[in-house]
Image (cartoon, rainbow, N blue to C red):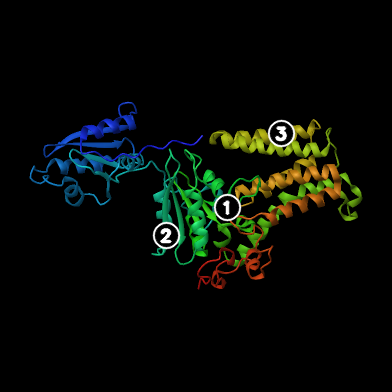
């Protein structure tokens, strides 16, 4: 069912008519946070609308104090023009002609003035949003480097980005999404670098969003931009670090900032964007390359360690003589495939429990998981010790994956490969890997090949992915973004 829109109504010269309409539409008197202050200015009635908690009381108090000091002669004639140009001591002012625009700006925290005899309203952008300090995000911590992170306030996030890119060609185009929520969404890009077609595509898809609200913020916006898909792999990259956002802007990417969300969406992205971490660029190139390869090994182990080990245990003829020790010494009372599936589900349960557990109790929950789920399960024969060992190694590889969304997708792939091995053996593993590769090859994010630069192969682009290159040697921007200016230096 389509959402209803308010009919546009011009602001009337009658203050009583405006008051009756606005009070009914806004629910003044019913909603405790919507306030109306009435006063007289030069013999003319004035209505001041505000939202308690979003309006800066210090600024509004100063504005009212200055207005009350005006004489009748100073407020004669075109009062709106005089207030706008002279008597309101604030730099962020705007005039509106319709009650619809008046209410829209009022509901984002601005303070509105309606004056008897005037057909324009004045809006004072004196909003203050509840916010928190820009603390470092938990999922993207670094040892060296900046420790600030994005918050839920759009203006603060754009300021953190501007602090790192002081370029007049940096653009933040803002629009509102959601018929009822009217959430602010900003598109960020470098005017002379970003691909114009990509900017226009994202802007058009945002404008085409028809929904009452986006309380889930950036995730809802992503689903509208990317479209309907059951592909588990993340098609955009999220970051809560201003330095990571800034470097992607310099590379030619287009970023999407959504108010109320501390995560910034990076487009377009490939699979390899999700396996890099800021820590690699905060260390020497050799150390960064080492960290990257260790991370690659962890991701590889999280995907293939369990399926390959299960294959070797179920088919001992594939085990080389030098590796005959990797089999099961003590079998559990349930099949190995079922043990792995139960362990996978148990890991997800513990992960969700850790998210919902208060911080002082997380240590106790970890002890319960280690002692009861681990040791007791082995002693009673539910699990073999090797299953616990290899599931733990896979879990470490999962948590070493920089992208939380990619780690979840890899977990689903791992369970799929386990099922294929359990039912079909070696052919099942080969078919399963092939199907996953075909899915990745066919996947495109905003018309960008997901496995680039591996498929299609680009040697110059894939070299810095596998070997962390020193920044002075990175002369060109990634060709996949199709930037207007391909040279960085």
Residue annotated with mark 2 = 171
Q: Is residue 355 visible?
A: yes
Give the x, y percent position of residue 363.
60, 36
Determine the CA span between mark 1 and mark 2: 20 Å
Q: Secondary structure at mark 2?
A: strand
Residue depicted at x 8% and y 42%: 72
Q: Marks 3 and 1: which is nearer the front?
A: 1
Reading the chain from its start, which is encountered first: label 3 or label 1? 1
Label 3 close to label 1 by CB (< 8 Å): no
Q: Position of residue 168 (x, y in %)?
A: 38, 64
The secondary structure type at the circle numbered 3 is: helix
Q: State the residue at coordinates (66%, 56%).
A: 295
- The residue identified by callout 3 is 373
Q: Which residue is mark 1?
A: 236
Judging from the image, what secondary structure is the residue with disc 1 in? loop
Give the Cα separation between the discs numbered 2 and 3: 52 Å
- Residue 145 visible? The answer is no
Which is closer to the viewer, label 2 or label 3? 2
- Find residue 26 and report its image quarter: top left
In the drawing, does residue 473 fall left or right of residue 20?
right
**Measuring 42% from the left and 42% from the top, which residue is drawn there?**
182
- The number of discs equals 3
| Residue name at image x 51 percent, y 51 percent | 205
Q: Is residue 276 left or right of residue 170?
A: right
């Amino acid at each position: 069912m389509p959402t209803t829109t308010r009919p546009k109504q011009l602001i009337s010269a009658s203050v009583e008519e405006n008051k009756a309409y606005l009070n009914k539409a806004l629910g003044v008197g019913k909603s405790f946070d919507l306030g109306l202050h009435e006063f007289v200015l030069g013999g003319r009635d004035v209505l001041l609308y505000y939202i308690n908690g979003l309006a800066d009381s210090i600024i509004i108090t100063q504005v009212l104090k200055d207005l009350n000091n005006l004489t009748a002669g100073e407020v004669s004639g075109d009062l709106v023009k005089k207030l706008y140009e002279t008597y309101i001591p604030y730099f962020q002012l705007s005039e509106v002609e319709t009650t619809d625009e008046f209410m829209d700006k009022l509901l984002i925290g601005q303070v509105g003035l309606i004056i008897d005899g005037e057909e324009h309203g004045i809006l004072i952008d004196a909003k203050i949003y509840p916010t928190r300090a820009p603390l470092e995000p938990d999922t993207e911590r670094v040892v060296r480097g900046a420790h600030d992170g994005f918050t839920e306030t759009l203006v603060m996030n754009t300021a953190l980005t501007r602090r790192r890119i002081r370029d007049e060609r940096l653009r933040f185009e803002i629009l509102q999404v959601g018929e009822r929520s009217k959430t602010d969404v900003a598109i960020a890009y470098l005017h002379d670098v970003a691909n114009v077609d990509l900017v226009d595509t994202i802007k058009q898809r945002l404008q085409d969003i028809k929904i009452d609200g986006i309380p889930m913020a950036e995730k809802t916006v992503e689903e509208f931009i990317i479209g309907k898909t059951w592909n588990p792999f993340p098609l955009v990259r999220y970051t809560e670090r201003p330095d990571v956002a800034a470097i992607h802007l310099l590379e030619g990417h287009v970023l999407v900032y959504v108010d109320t969300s501390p995560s910034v969406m990076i487009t377009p992205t490939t699979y390899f964007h999700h396996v890099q971490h800021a820590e690699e660029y905060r260390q020497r190139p050799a150390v960064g390359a080492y960290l990257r390869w260790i991370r690659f090994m962890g991701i590889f182990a999280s995907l293939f360690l369990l399926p390959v080990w299960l294959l070797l245990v179920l088919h001992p003829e594939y085990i080389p003589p030098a590796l005959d020790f990797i089999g099961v010494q003590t079998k559990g009372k349930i099949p190995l495939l079922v043990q792995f599936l139960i362990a996978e589900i148990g890991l997800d349960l513990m992960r969700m429990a850790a998210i919902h557990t208060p911080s002082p109790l997380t240590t106790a929950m970890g002890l319960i998981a280690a002692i009861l789920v681990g040791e007791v399960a082995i002693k009673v024969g539910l699990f073999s010790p090797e299953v616990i060992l290899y599931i733990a190694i896979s879990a470490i590889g999962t948590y070493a994956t920089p992208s939380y969304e990619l780690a979840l997708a890899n977990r689903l792939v791992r369970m799929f490969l386990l099922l294929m091995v359990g039912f079909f053996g070696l052919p099942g593993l080969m078919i399963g890997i092939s199907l996953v590769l075909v899915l990745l090859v066919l996947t495109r994010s905003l018309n960008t090949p997901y496995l680039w630069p591996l498929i299609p192969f680009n040697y110059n682009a894939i070299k810095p992915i596998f070997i962390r290159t020193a920044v002075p040697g990175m002369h060109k921007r990634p060709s996949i973004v199709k930037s207007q200016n391909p040279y960085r230096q």
